[in-house]
Image (cartoon, rainbow, N blue to C red):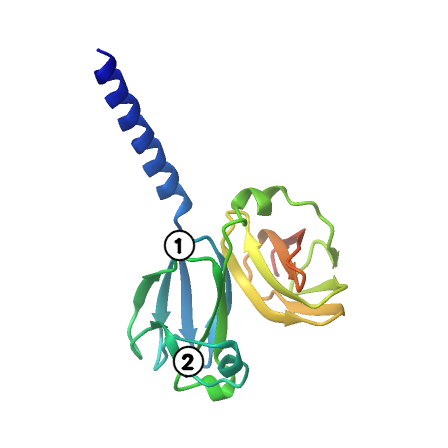
Amino acid sequence: MTALLHRLLALSTLVVLFILQAKAQTTHTIRGLDFYYLPDTLWMQPGDSVHFQTAGIHDMVQTDSAYWAIGQAIGNGGFHTTIGADTTFVIDTAGTYYFVCSPHGIVGMRGVLIVDGTLGLEHVANGHDRLRLYPVPATDHLYVLVNDAAIASIMDIHGRSVGAFLSMDIGWNRIDISRLDPGQYVVLLRRSNGTQVTGRFSVLARK
């Protein structure tokens, strides 16, 4: 009887772990459009997938930060999708992954995957509103006050990245939100020292 209980307990534990793992894994979509990625920056959890959809002659080539900075798609042995093909791949290890479009890196088509096991939906949903945003609610543009070098991302209420900016300058930064649907959103800012701050805002229906 004791052995049976132990087996049932072990099985229950495995089922719970499987469910938790399944919940934690998310597929994020990046689209290759004209000469840019949408979004060009993603915050992810280890084990999440990236689904790359391309509407043209584009790919995603993982490269080092030095090559990324000058738009050169020099692969470093990481992910490398086929030009013009939709692809899905998994990132299992936390870190920052830089990628460039090999045909169009020279015109600035590049992006970043930030894989951080400490970032969860509860952080986005319950983070303190410490960012200064104006106007709130907004329609087509939002101004964000930044006090330190930072990377910003806009997320919807489900924690999905819907807009990203590779870097923001110190001071007031103007963000184009004209492509966002009406609704509630969160600006997530990651500073150069690794700390994160959030601010909530809403987008009004346009006439």
Q: Identify the residue at image location x=61%, y=65%.
A: 177
> Which label was assigned to residue 48?
1
- Against 3, residue 33 (above or below) is below
Let me know if residue 148 appears in the view: yes
State left or right for residue 51 relative to residue 43: left
Seen as rendered, the residue at the extreme bottom is: 106
Let me know if residue 39 appears in the view: no
Seen as rendered, the residue at the extreme top is: 1
Seen as rendered, the residue at the extreme front is: 3
Between the residue at mark 2 and the residue at mark 1, the CA separation in whole angstroms equals 21 Å
Q: Position of residue 188 (x, y in %)?
A: 62, 56
Kindly indicate the quadrant of the structure image that contains residue 205. Answer: bottom right
Alpha-carbon neighbours of circle 2 within 10 Å: few (<14), some, or many (≥20)?
Answer: many
* Disc 2 secondary structure class: loop
Q: Of 38 and 135, which appears nearest the observer?
A: 38
State left or right for residue 76 relative to residue 189: left
Q: Position of residue 30 (x, y in %)?
A: 42, 66
Q: Amino acid at mark 1?
A: Asp
Which of the image's four quarters has the N terminus?
top left
Q: What residue does disc 2 label?
A: 101
Q: Identify the residue at image location x=72%, y=64%.
A: 143
- Against 167, residue 162 (above or below) is above
Q: Earlier in the sequence, mark 2 or mark 1?
A: 1
- Against 69, residue 13 (above or below) is above
Q: Position of residue 32 (x, y in %)?
A: 41, 74
Kindly indicate the quadrant of the structure image that contains residue 104. Answer: bottom left
Q: Amino acid at mark 2?
A: Cys
Q: How many marks?
A: 2
* Disc 1 secondary structure class: loop
Alpha-carbon neighbours of circle 1 within 10 Å: few (<14), some, or many (≥20)?
Answer: many
